[in-house]
Image: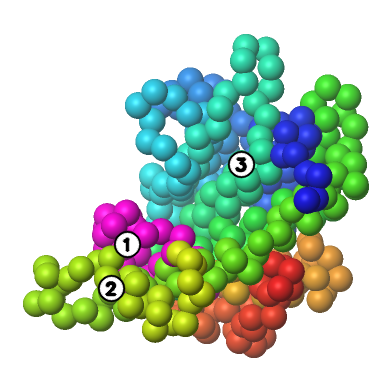
Amino acid sequence: RYNFDGGELKPYLSLEAMTAAVFDVAGQLFGLRFVERPDIAGYHPDVKVYEVRETVEGEDRLRAIFLHDNYSRQNKQSGAWMSELRAACPAQGTVPIILNNNNFAKGREGAPTLLSFDDARTLFHEFGHGCHGMLSATNFLRLAGTNVLRDFVELPSQLMEHWLAQPEVLKKHARHYKTQEAVPDELLARLKAAENFNQGFGTVEYTISALLDQSLHTVPGERAAELDIGAFEEAELARLGMPQGMAMRHRPAHFQHLFSTSAYAAAYYVYQWAEVLDADGFEAFLEAGSCFDGDTAHRARKYIYSSGNSLEPGEAYRLFRGRDPTVEPMLKKKGL
């Protein structure tokens, strides 16, 4: 419908360029500098190690150690994630060691690794989690970095995703790996139109999954063993007034977020809640006139990326934004 082929965009999104882009974003927002240390061996030859440095009161300081493990390989867990190998503790002078893992298909010998737009978004997303760990400024390890309530943990990562789509970032870094030509505006316009396609369906599909998650966790324990999960799903969709044929994003029998661990049990909604927060939060930059506005970036660092769980999430967000979040920016972002 929108004449968009993701393959057209990949030559402009090399892993090297997108890594430079996300480091540039962190530099403009938070004053961080990433210095590669090829002399420090990672746990695998593919792992790159960086010193993360910043200038504080005129003095150059080490902020963190950052490890980037970007390629898929045999015996590596699938997916993408951030790990905190050592948490920050400013009172003890402890520098955090943060690891970002991705699973991108490595380019053949002598060729660059080219990313899809979704891959690039994943790179930015996990880096947002990484910044949450690297910028932690609390002195209690149990409150540091990503040790926050589920309602808040996806905000730093999803907020970081917004910079990938900004013209200032794309025009500078999204360049054809052969010609260094900037990505064409017309291609970006088709990408945006394609990204907004079917958002209404996707939003409803996710919402009913989150609502069923909540309903399942109200079932008393003595009834759970005898519960017909298929019948429960059908009854819940009817109760919610869903159109015939409208299915959940994840059917209950393989809804791993609910059952594989307790981390997201009764909390699948947090991704959509984070969408409300990240869209409203990024709107603060746009209202200030620049996606790199200094005052807004300072508040984002202080209250979103550095405070850990030392502040109640609602209080932290209000200190950043000056008010409670509203849903309108998320709806605008989705084209709804």
Does any portion of residue 264 appear in the rendered image? yes
> What's the distance in space between the residues labelled 1 and 3, CA to CA?
27 Å
Residue sitting at 84 percent across and 66 percent down?
290
Give the image quarter of residue 50: top right
Residue 232 tag number? 2
Labels 1 and 2: the sequence-earlier one: 2
Which residue in the structure is indicated by mark 1?
252
Q: Secondary structure at mark 2?
A: helix
Range covered by the magenta-colored residues: 248-273
Does any portion of residue 306 appear in the rendered image? no
Q: Position of residue 152 (x, y in %)?
A: 48, 70
Q: Which residue is outermost to the left?
A: 222
Residue 312 tag number? none
The reply to whether dot 1 and dot 2 touch (C-beta < 8 Å) is yes
Give the image quarter of residue 324: bottom right
Which residue in the structure is indicated by mark 3?
119
Residue sitting at 21 percent across and 79 percent down?
219
> What's the distance in space between the residues labelled 1 and 2, CA to CA?
9 Å
